[in-house]
Amino acid sequence: MNEYNEYILKTNKLGKAWIWTAAVLIFMVPVAVCIRFNAWPAASSVLKGLLGVAPIYWTVGFIEVVTYTPMLGTAGTYLSFVTGNVTALKVPAALNAIESAEVKLGTEQAEIISTIAIATASIITTIVIALGVFLFAKLTPILNSPSLKPAFDNILPALFGGLGVVYISRNWKIAVAPIIIMIGLFIAVPSLGNSVGILVPVGIIIALGASKIMYKKGWL
């Protein structure tokens, strides 16, 4: 077994340990509140609440793992989901770092670069969030300013827009079909804006299908 395989095995071991630790800590918050105030919700009420939101989170969670893992790498995936500071924000950081280093996804070099990029992004976002919490009272009037609201509403589109320019410019023909279909879909059904995570793999499938058709026709 070479050093890289040993690294992956160790990463999986530590990653699972930290994932389960994070899960226990998350569940301990409501449990601690219930114990402190001796207020336990009825099982039927909990089940009723879960039925409305849990299937969505389970679906998105599964899709994110399947979609992001090949891009983030083993360590990057564990680091992203353990820290939990908006995993989607870390994908551009990892891909841009890999792109700048001119290495291929899935290689040992990409694994290392992705991990460093995500670790840096996690540290920065954690520091920003911590500062935001401590300074929240003073920053609230500024953050709630109507002039800043459009910026906060478009953080993810801006990040993925910048990332998209890099990759779409490589072969714009592949991007035409998914962009047209997705724009038409969101215009026809605006409520799907809250289901972007679920529609990401749908866009990937559309891109793959369109690419296959264009390749057979000699357009690629």
Image (spheres, rainbow, N blue to C red):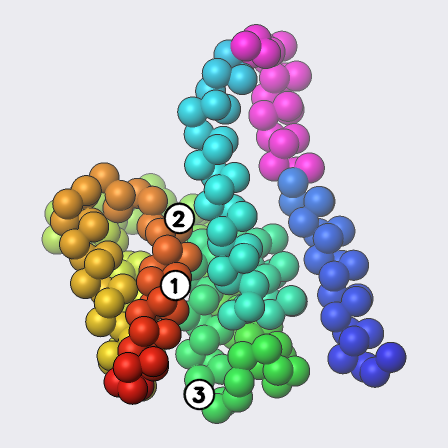
Helix, strand or loop for disc 3: helix
Helix, strand or loop for disc 1: helix
The furthest residue to the right:
1
Pointer 1 local density, CA inside 10 Å: few below 14, some 14–19, many at least 20: some
Residue 14 vertical placement versus 61 (above, below): below
**Residue 174 located left or right of residue 7:** left
**Residue 148 vs residue 45, the one in the foreground:** 45
Badges 2 and 1: C-beta atoms under 8 Å apart?
no
Task: Give yes or no for residue 45 being in the magenta stretch.
Answer: no
Task: Give the residue displayed 59% in from the left and 21% down from the top.
Answer: 33
Residue hosting label 2: 198
Residue 106 vertical placement versus 10 (above, below): below
Amino acid type at image mark 3: Ser
Residue hosting label 1: 204
Amino acid type at image mark 2: Ile
Residue hosting label 3: 100
List x then y, in percent, for residue 212.
Answer: 37, 74
